[in-house]
Image (cartoon, helix red, strand yellow):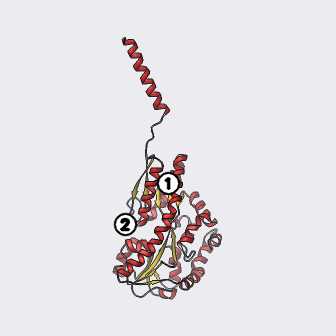
Amino acid sequence: MKPFIRCTAIVTIMVIVWGLFLIVPVTQARELRISHQFSEADARHKLALEFAAEVEKATEGSLTFKLFPSQALFKSKSQYDALAKGALDLSVFPLAYASGKIPELDITLMPCIIDSIEEGMSWRNKEIGKRVEAICEKRGMKIITWLWYAGGIGSKVKPIIVPDDVKGMKFRAAGKLFEFMLNEAGASITSMASSEMYMALQTGVLNAGLTSAESFVSYRLYEPLEYFNTPENYSIWYMAEPIVISMRTWNSLSVKEKEAVTEVGLKLEDRALEIANSANSIATKVFKEAGIKVHAMTKDEWQTWRILAEKTSWKRFADKVKSGQELLDLAK
């Protein structure tokens, strides 16, 4: 082959190859960060892992994820600001933690507003859930997978069964409206993260506390406690802790990526319900095996707490929060 012809052939091949690069763009994986406050042993962390794996598979690797459990990236109460600013992509986030800036979200940690995890999960398809989703999206985060957890009541001095039992107790209440209700009932309130309860119970700073069933187990609170009111049948404490995505991150995704995230998020809700209910039965089993005196709340006992909640927390929410009464009516 003559040199001129050879050079022409090489140039032609190069042009064809370059044209293929222009026609078929190379997809580059994008890594999203998921931060949450829970330990790696916690079922909520495992749910986040499932979500990440399923989305990565559904997007054929265009989205990948790095998880930061145990507040390794952001402190629990700092996650909302990070989501709103786009500094954090996703979180398994207790919505009421943002209530300092979005007071309406206290409806998702309202004493006795629901009486089961199933009722909480049904919010997605009810007006109350649509309102909560709209509030979140307007303020910078989008709910992808609804998740509710039930909480129990642990104590050292005496069992906490009905409202009168809290008088004189030093309580970790888990939520501003729970703090208000229990304080009105005669308890002394100390605010802290659930991860700090173990030491506080050991040192006498607390002698009672509310937190999720999963946290009671993962933080080994059965060791310093003597009594446990399990949420297996009824609970006064239910909290929305969904998987959320920053609206800035959401708006930056492609149409196909949004479809994948949405489909995986919906699919995981059956799994979320399963693990939340399982957490309640596991907590009962673990506490009984540890020799703790376990009580399962009855409907009548729950009703006495609801009467107290209506007079205290519900009234305060309606009085202090714009659209508070409207949200209560929708939730009821």
Residue 75 appearing in the image: no
At label 1, the amino acid type is Lys
Determine the residue positioned at 44% across, 28% down: 18
Residue 296 is marked as: none
Q: Which residue is mark 2?
A: 41
Q: Residues within 10 Å of mark 2 (few under 14, many from 20)?
A: few
Determine the residue positioned at 39% across, 16% down: 7
Of the numbered discs 2 and 1, the one sitting upstream in the chain is: 2
C-alpha separation, residue under disc 2 versus residue under disc 1: 29 Å
At label 2, the amino acid type is Ala
Q: Is residue 99 above or below residue 299?
A: above
Q: Quadrant of the C terminus?
A: bottom right
Pinpoint residue 104: horizontal percent, then vertical percent. 58, 67
Q: Is residue 41 above or below residue 254?
A: below
Q: Which residue is mark 1?
A: 85
Q: Nearer the viewer, mark 2 or mark 1?
A: 2
